[in-house]
Image (cartoon, rainbow, N blue to C red):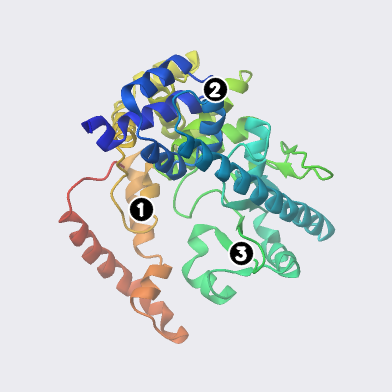
Amino acid sequence: MSSGCQTGRIEFDLLCALVRPVPDLMRARKALRAGVDFPIDLALAAKHGVRPRLIEGLGALSWDAVPATARTALEGFRRRHCARVLSLLHEVRRLDAALAESNVRFALFKGPALAAMLYGDPSAREYDDIDVVVPRAQYADAELTLAGLGYRGAQGDSVFRRAFLSHLRQYVFVHPDVDAAIDLHWDFSGAYLPFPLAPEEIWGTLEPVRFGNCAPPAVAGPNLALLLAGHGTKEAWRRLQWVCDFAWLVKHRSDLDWSDLHRRARARRCGDCLLLAFAVARGLLDTAVPDALVRPLEGSTRVLVLAAALVEALREGRLAPERPENFGDLGLCDNARDRLKAVLELTLAPTVSDYNAMPLPRPLWPVYHATRPFRLAAKALTARRRPGSALY
């Protein structure tokens, strides 16, 4: 087997050729002729959350050169995925009705809403949960509404969540009879870090997403562009799915004012995340950079170097090395001052991992503020002994 097959480069190239908004069928056929290891390809597609796009792309090729075992596996996934999507849409309908009855303002983002808005079909994208954002002032009411639907916090009781998870600005809720979670947010990123989109900016620009007989509101248009760029950067663009989402939005929303969006992101001290989204999408999916952003992008050495490292890591099947909890989000910060400020504040914010490393009774929880810096220092020293360096 060639070194390309060993690293999955040919298989990853096939994914990049087929998941883009306009599949590059000639490039895909070239990859197939080079010899695709389909077990590797299917594993990569699952890892990157792009199996629905891969199925559609291979169908456009009439499944040419695809082994029967691989096609059977993908068709089996599609049946399971569609059944799961129907279950999730049932939960979306219940959630929509319950929050409306409770007079809780809310918006869907990512998950089924994003699949329907970008790809025209809630089953055309993989997702594991339902993301909902509500105003901070109504968060307690939203929690009570979820409890009425049978959902319970997956991260301990409310006191535990406030002590160790409030900096995340979201909590996870699960239902014993539902194979998915609801991520209930009051912001789009953790505390101490900038993000290109503020929750208060979305409420006047939401768009309904039709799911049968219900049409819940969702983040859309320019705000969705900022959300996707910010989310991908926050997660270090570790999944091709997120690059694909951004590329599809760029392709189908030619009306967006990218200069204004970059201005908005810069005003929130994370303008680089929009440039990085384009640089990564250009490097992997040949997404065209709009004229308004060509000069800012080409003039940013930080973004170009970071994008090149991220693209190469994805092509080689590498991810950014493990970092202490929440510190991977530092790529959102445009400048070193914000990154330093975030590091200092996150260093003092107790997390669940601190509790798990040293469980203490509730009256002693304030001690974690003092012990956390020492635990992080020990973890950092251990990480430095491992090969590889952080991309952010």
Residue at screen point 54% across, 22% down:
62
- Residue pointed to by mark 3: 173
Could you tell me if residue 236 is visible in this image? Answer: yes
- Residue pointed to by mark 2: 62
Element at label 1: helix
Q: Is residue 263 left or right of residue 35?
A: right
Element at label 3: strand
Foreground mark, 2 or 3, reads 2
Count of residue discs: 3
Q: Is residue 357 left or right of residue 180?
A: left
Quadrant holding the C terminus:
top left
| Residue 272: mark | none
Where is residue 248 shown, x and y percent of the image? Answer: 56, 27
Q: Amino acid at mark 1?
A: Phe
Residue at screen point 64% across, 40% down:
123
Local crowd size for mark 2, using a 10 Å CA cut-off: few (<14), some (14–19), many (≥20) = few
Q: Amino acid at mark 2?
A: Ser
Residue at screen point 41% across, 32% down:
272
The Cα atoms of the two marked residues, 2 and 3, are separated by: 41 Å
Q: Amino acid at mark 3?
A: Phe
